[in-house]
């Protein structure tokens, strides 16, 4: 079953200026529409290194919904547990400035309640043999409860990200049952009712370590854009992950790629420090323009090259049929280095 990824699907509509962006003015530009959603992106990212994840989600009962399923299937994602329902996908409308940052956005969330019924019916077969679980914390409360129930039942690690921190705040008590939570600096400020945007990595790391301990959160990572990322665990381990330089076209998806790398690292036996380094390398790989291989496939070339990098970092093989890396169970206690 590999890593099971659970979350919502969005259609992202993005606008980019052709000249200097003028706030509040009319800006000539280009508009593109792509499949999005935090965990949809994560499932595709994991599949791009041929680890064959399973995606549990909903899509519209339209041609667009089928397009989402077909694209994920081409990336070798297991789409068996994606249901087609009315209003199954959300919409995210965003405008970017010349630096690739979002300057305005509006989001219409989908109705994800049917996921609760899906997990009640098929939860055992989904989670029993999986390697690990990645989830959006801002799904319906009953859905999150079910995921945590099956994770405890089958002794699986759970990793969480967030697409809407305001909604996720209503589920903050679940964080004590999450093995590792990943969010950005602004979202961390919302979670702990503080202002963190002015902090550098050293101060952010100290602050996070104190907050994680007092809130009894097993482990947490905060991404800081071009400043890198910091992490802290309840057992006292903490650290800073330096940023890697990359040409930025669009900052959306970078946090999702970091989360995907963290999930892979922790699932297959790496310490938090090693997993965070893996995540930073993955974000760089997925942000860089892909090179075409001799076979003419940019995705395949990128996936195979990064898969080889994973094999070297993990000192274990990854087969074409999926991962043969040994998953690690238990809680978020830091794993010993090999």
Image (tube, grey):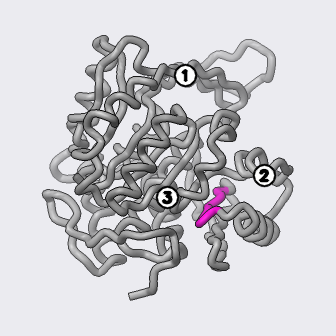
Point 61% across, 25% down: residue: 94
**Residue 187 x/y as whole percent:** 70, 46
Neighbor class of circle 2 (other Cα within 10 Å; few <14, some 14-19, many 20+) is: some
Task: Sort mark 1 into few (<14), some (14-19) or many (20+) by Cα contacts within 10 Å.
Answer: some
Marks 2 and 3: CB-CB under 8 Å? no
Residues under numbered marks 2 and 1 in contact, where contact means CB atoms less than 8 Å apart: no
Residue named by callout 2: 192
Of badges 3 and 1, the one in the foreground is 1
Work out how far the residue at label 3 is from the one at label 1, CA to CA, in angstroms: 29 Å
Residue at the spot of label 1: 109
Name the mark nearer the viewer: 2 or 1.
2
Label 3 crowd (10 A; few <14 / some 14-19 / many >=20): some
Q: In x, y percent, where is residue 300?
A: 24, 50
Q: Secondary structure at mark 2?
A: loop
Residue 80, quarter of picture: top left
Image point (49%, 41%), residue name:
144
Looking at the image, residue 321 sits to the left or right of residue 253; the answer is left
- How much space separates mark 2 and mark 3, taking CA atoms? 29 Å
**Quadrant assignment, res 116:** top left
220 over 299 or under it: above or below: below
Q: Secondary structure at mark 3?
A: helix
Task: Name the residue at 62% across, 51% down.
Answer: 183
User: Of helix, strand and loop, which mostly describes the magenta segment?
Assistant: strand
User: Is 257 situated above or below 58?
Assistant: below
Camera-side mark, 2 or 3: 2
Whether the magenta-drawn stretch holds residue 221 is answered as yes
Magenta segment: 217-223
| Whether label 3 touches label 1, CB < 8 Å | no
Specify whether 287 is left or right of 130.
Answer: right
Residue holding disc 3:
284
């Amino acid at each position: 079953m590999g890593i099971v990824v659970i979350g919502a699907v969005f259609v992202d509509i993005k606008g980019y200026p052709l000249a200097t962006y003028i706030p509040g003015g009319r800006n000539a530009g280009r508009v593109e529409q792509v499949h999005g959603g935090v965990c949809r992106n994560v499932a595709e990212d994991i599949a791009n290194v041929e680890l064959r994840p399973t995606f549990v989600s909903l899509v519209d009962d339209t041609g667009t919904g089928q397009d989402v399923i077909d694209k994920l299937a081409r990336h070798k994602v297991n789409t068996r547990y994606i249901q087609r329902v009315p209003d199954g996908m959300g919409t995210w409308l965003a405008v970017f400035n010349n630096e690739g940052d979002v300057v305005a956005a509006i989001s219409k969330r989908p109705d994800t309640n049917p996921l609760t019924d899906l997990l009640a019916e098929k939860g055992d077969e989904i989670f029993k043999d999986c390697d690990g679980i990645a989830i959006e914390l801002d799904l319906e409360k009953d859905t999150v409860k079910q995921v945590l129930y099956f994770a405890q039942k089958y002794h699986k690690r759970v990793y969480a990200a967030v697409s809407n921190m305001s909604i996720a705040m209503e589920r903050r008590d679940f964080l004590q049952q999450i093995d590792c939570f990943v969010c950005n600096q602004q979202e961390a400020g919302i979670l702990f009712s503080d202002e963190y945007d002015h902090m550098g990595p050293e101060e952010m790391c100290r602050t996070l370590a104190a907050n994680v301990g007092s809130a009894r959160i097993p482990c947490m990572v905060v991404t800081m854009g071009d400043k890198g990322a910091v992490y802290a665990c309840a057992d006292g381990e903490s650290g800073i992950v330096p940023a890697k330089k990359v040409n930025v076209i669009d900052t959306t998806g970078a946090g999702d790629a970091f989360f995907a790398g963290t999930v892979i690292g922790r699932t297959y036996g790496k310490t938090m420090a090693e997993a965070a380094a893996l995540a930073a390398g993955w974000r760089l790989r997925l942000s860089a323009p892909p090179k075409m291989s001799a076979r003419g496939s940019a995705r395949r070339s990128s996936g195979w090259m990064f898969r080889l990098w994973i094999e070297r970092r993990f000192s274990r093989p990854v087969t074409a049929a999926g991962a043969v890396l040994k998953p690690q169970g238990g809680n978020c206690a830091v794993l010993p280095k090999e």
